[in-house]
Structure formats: structure tokens, C-alpha cells
Image (cartoon, grey):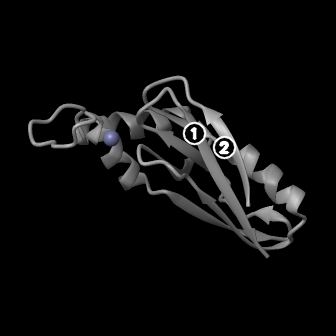
């Protein structure tokens, strides 16, 4: 397994990590297999979405905020960051991408993102390549 860290510098952000994942795939010299990317945190997640127009990342964060307010009388979690936990679960903890002929098989407009919901923090990303 490989891993790297990302220092996030705002409360919520989608941070592109496709470049780091591509480097790990290249280094592995695996030409056919699966790349498993895992985020070992409860208030950050991973997602794959548009890599060209940064407004898409903005809109995703905006609407998650609309749907999942930071304060809600019904929340019980004493740490006060329930919204971050909920958003992380919605995004998910892992994404898998097929490797074919040594290349990640992402769509033209797709990028892989670390989704921070309770930053700024230092986040780990685990990457396992299965040949
Ligand atoms: Zn918490």
C-alpha cells in the first residue's frame, strides 16, 4: 500500500488528487488491474467528478451545505461536527478506478477529489493497486 498526505487549508473543499494517484500507478508499473483509493477519516471522503469547470466543485459544496446545515437541533454528536460526518458518508470513503494499459480509466471530464468537510486538517490517502 502507498499513502500520501494532503494539508487542507479551509473548512470545506474538494482537493484534486488525480495527479498523485497517477504517479503511484505509474510507479507501480502495473498495466492491468484496479486502483483502490481509501480515505481513513470520518469527516473527509473521496469522490470523482468534473475536473474542468471549478464551479462544479463549488456547486457540490454549496448544495451539501444547503442540505446538511452545520447546526441542527436534532444533532446529538457532542463534538459539534455532525454535518461533516454526514457529508463524508454521502461522499464515501473509497473510490476504485480500473487500470488498463498502465492508465487510470477515468472519463475525459473526471477527476478524483479528496472531500474535506472539517478542515483545515492534515488528511491521509491510502492507495492500493491490485494487479
Ligand atoms: Zn465528530
Q: Which type of secondary structure does the marked residue at label 2 adopt? A: loop
Which residue bears the numbered disc 2?
17
Q: Residue at x 28, y 35 (%)?
A: 79
In this rendering, would 104 be left or right of 15? Answer: right
Residue 63 lies, with reference to residue 8, above or below; the image says below
Q: Position of residue 40 (x, y in %)?
A: 53, 52
In this rendering, would 58 be left or right of 7? Answer: left
Q: Is mark 1 within 8 Å of ligand 1?
A: no
Q: Residue at x 24, y 42 (%)?
A: 67
Q: Residue at x 49, y 26 (%)?
A: 120
Residue 69 lies, with reference to residue 51, above or below; the image says above
Q: Position of residue 3 (x, y in %)?
A: 71, 50
Identify the mark nearer the N-term, 2 or 1: 2
Q: Is mark 2 within 8 Å of ligand 1?
A: no
Q: Around disc 1, counting alpha carbons within 10 Å, would you say few (fewer than 14), some (14 to 19), or many (20 or more)? A: many
Q: CA distance from mark 2 to mark 1?
A: 12 Å
Q: Around disc 2, counting alpha carbons within 10 Å, would you say few (fewer than 14), some (14 to 19), or many (20 or more)? A: some
Q: Residue at x 81, y 62 (%)?
A: 103
Q: Which type of secondary structure does the marked residue at label 1 adopt? A: strand
The image quadrant where one finds the C terminus is bottom right
Q: Which numbered tag is attached to residue 123?
A: 1
The image quadrant where one finds the N terminus is bottom right
Quadrant for ligand 1?
top left
- Which numbered mark, 2 or 1, is in the foreground of this view? 1
Amino acid at each position: 500500500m502507498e499513502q500520501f498526505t494532503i494539508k487542507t487549508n479551509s473548512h470545506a473543499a474538494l482537493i484534486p488528487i488525480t495527479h498523485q494517484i497517477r504517479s503511484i500507478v505509474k510507479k507501480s508499473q502495473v498495466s492491468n488491474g484496479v486502483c483502490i483509493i481509501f480515505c481513513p477519516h470520518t469527516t473527509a471522503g473521496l469522490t470523482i467528478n468534473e475536473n474542468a469547470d471549478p464551479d462544479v466543485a463549488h456547486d457540490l459544496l454549496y448544495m451539501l451545505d444547503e442540505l446538511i446545515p452545520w447546526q441542527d437541533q436534532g444533532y446529538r454528536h457532542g463534538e459539534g461536527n455532525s454535518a461533516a460526518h454526514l457529508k463524508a458518508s454521502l461522499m464515501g470513503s473509497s473510490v476504485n478506478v480500473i487500470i488498463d494499459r498502465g492508465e487510470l480509466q477515468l472519463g475525459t471530464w473526471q477527476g478524483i477529489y479528496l472531500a474535506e468537510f472539517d478542515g483545515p486538517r492534515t488528511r491521509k490517502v491510502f492507495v492500493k493497486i491490485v494487479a
